Image (tube, coloured by chain):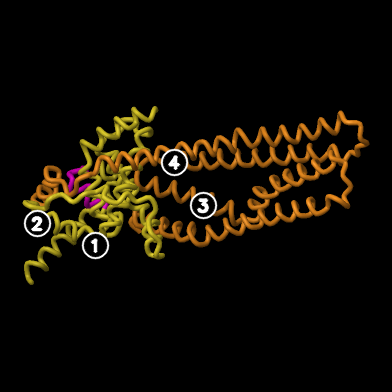
Chain colours: A yellow, B orange
């Protein structure tokens, strides 16, 4: 595929579904610089993945798959941060903060709960909240539907427990 | 607050996104990535299609000079370029076989997150095995070393210079090639220990998590 065609498809995907990338970035990275780094990493992986897209799944499913895989693999860079080195090639200012006026406070609450989940459960939670079916989640994550069911039950219990705990206090 | 309500709140982000994107900077990042991909392809192409023919052409040139010049030659002289070419081709064959076998190992994995993790693990195993197992280290390191030495000795022989005047180049060249080979093996092993094995452990833990163990 020629670069201009890849760029055109990439721009269309980004214009239509960048919300998916924001959600994954917000769920997997917690510092400003890390979010910039992860967003750049994910967008470049999505750009690279355009060639491999065969239309066997929808574009949002594909983008979720690439974004989640990149976010989980991104931990190797996290290790680099821990060793006190700066991330390479980070384009600072790539991600700009949007106004938080009128944002539902339940969204921030959900992000706080998601941040406490394990890597894989975090992926399942994002997909669940975005309305993906058990079958689709199983296909994206690569586990059985019954395993998805187990993880979703665990996530629901954790959310319900947290709500109850906060209601009491 | 039911799950449906939470989902509704969650999906409200689509109407009011968490962030904006600086399109100009993103374009710059994509251009950088394009340049990186092109450079990578160019280097791989250069090594695959440039170095091998150049090296073979160089050794063939040595061989033909030995055949057609009038100086007295021994069988050992003719053996040098032949051994050099054979070593390099053997190395290229090992590399090709290794890559093909690895591609076959990775083929069963699909595009799901679990399969991506499993594929990444297979790649790490391949890299770690190549750098650590002695047979693999020798297989990857000895043939280019032999080809380099054969070329150097062949060059010395066609010049008809006595060993007494050229020994420092020959010995120095052999020592330098040996040091580069040992150094690159050491660096690869260090990388395996510091980077690949911790990453591998983390991916194995992730795979266990995915499998619900």
Q: Which mark is residue B125?
A: 3
Q: Which mark is residue A116?
A: 1
Main secondary structure found in the magenta portion: helix
Chain under disc 4: B
Q: Which mark is residue B36?
A: 4
Find the distance from the CA under tag 1 to the CA under tag 3: 31 Å
Q: Nearer the viewer, mark 4 or mark 1?
A: 4
Residue A80 vs residue A139: left or right? right
Residue at 33% across, 41% down: B28
Residue at 29% across, 59% down: A118
Regarding residue A152, the answer to whether it shows in the image is yes
- x%, y% of residue B176? 71, 54
Regarding residue A58, the answer to whether it shows in the image is no
Q: Nearer the viewer, mark 2 or mark 4?
A: 4
- Looking at the rendered structure, the secondary structure element under dot 3 is helix
The answer as to whether the residues below labels 3 and 4 share one chain is yes
Q: Which residues are magenta?
A: A123-133
Q: Residues within 10 Å of mark 3 (few under 14, many from 20)?
A: some
């Amino acid at each position: 595929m020629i670069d201009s065609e890849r760029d055109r498809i990439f721009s269309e995907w980004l214009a239509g579904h960048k919300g998916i990338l924001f959600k994954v970035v917000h769920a997997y990275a917690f510092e400003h610089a890390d979010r910039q780094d992860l967003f750049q990493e994910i967008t470049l992986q999505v750009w690279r993945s355009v060639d491999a897209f065969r239309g066997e799944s929808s574009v949002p499913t594909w983008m979720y798959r690439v974004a989640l895989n990149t976010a989980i693999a991104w931990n190797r860079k996290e290790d680099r941060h821990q060793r006190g080195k700066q991330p390479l090639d980070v384009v600072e200012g790539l991600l700009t903060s949007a106004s938080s006026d009128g944002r539902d406070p339940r969204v921030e609450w959900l992000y706080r709960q998601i941040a406490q989940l394990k890597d894989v459960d975090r992926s399942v939670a994002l997909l669940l909240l975005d309305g993906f079916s058990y079958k689709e989640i199983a296909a994206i994550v690569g586990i059985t539907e019954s395993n998805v069911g187990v993880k979703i039950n665990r996530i629901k219990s954790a959310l319900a427990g947290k709500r109850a705990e906060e209601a009491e206090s | 607050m039911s799950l449906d309500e939470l989902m509704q709140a969650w999906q409200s982000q689509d109407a009011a996104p968490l962030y904006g994107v600086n399109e100009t900077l993103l374009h710059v990042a994509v251009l950088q990535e394009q340049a990186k991909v092109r450079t990578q392809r160019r280097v791989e192409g250069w090594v695959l299609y440039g170095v091998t023919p150049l090296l073979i052409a160089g050794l063939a040139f040595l061989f033909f000079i030995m055949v057609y010049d009038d100086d007295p030659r021994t069988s050992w002289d003719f053996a040098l370029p032949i051994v050099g070419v054979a070593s390099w081709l053997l190395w290229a064959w090992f590399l090709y076989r290794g890559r093909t076998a690895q591609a076959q190992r990775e083929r069963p994995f699909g595009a799901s997150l679990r399969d991506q993790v499993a594929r990444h693990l297979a790649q790490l195993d391949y890299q770690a095995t190549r750098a650590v197992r002695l047979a693999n280290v020798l297989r990857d390191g000895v043939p280019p070393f032999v080809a380099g030495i054969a070329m150097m000795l062949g060059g010395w022989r066609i010049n008809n210079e006595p060993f007494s005047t050229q020994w420092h180049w020959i010995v120095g060249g052999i020592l330098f090639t040996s040091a580069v080979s040992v150094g690159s093996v050491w660096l690869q092993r260090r990388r395996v220990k510091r980077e690949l094995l911790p990453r591998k452990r983390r991916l194995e833990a992730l795979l266990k998590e995915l499998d619900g163990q």
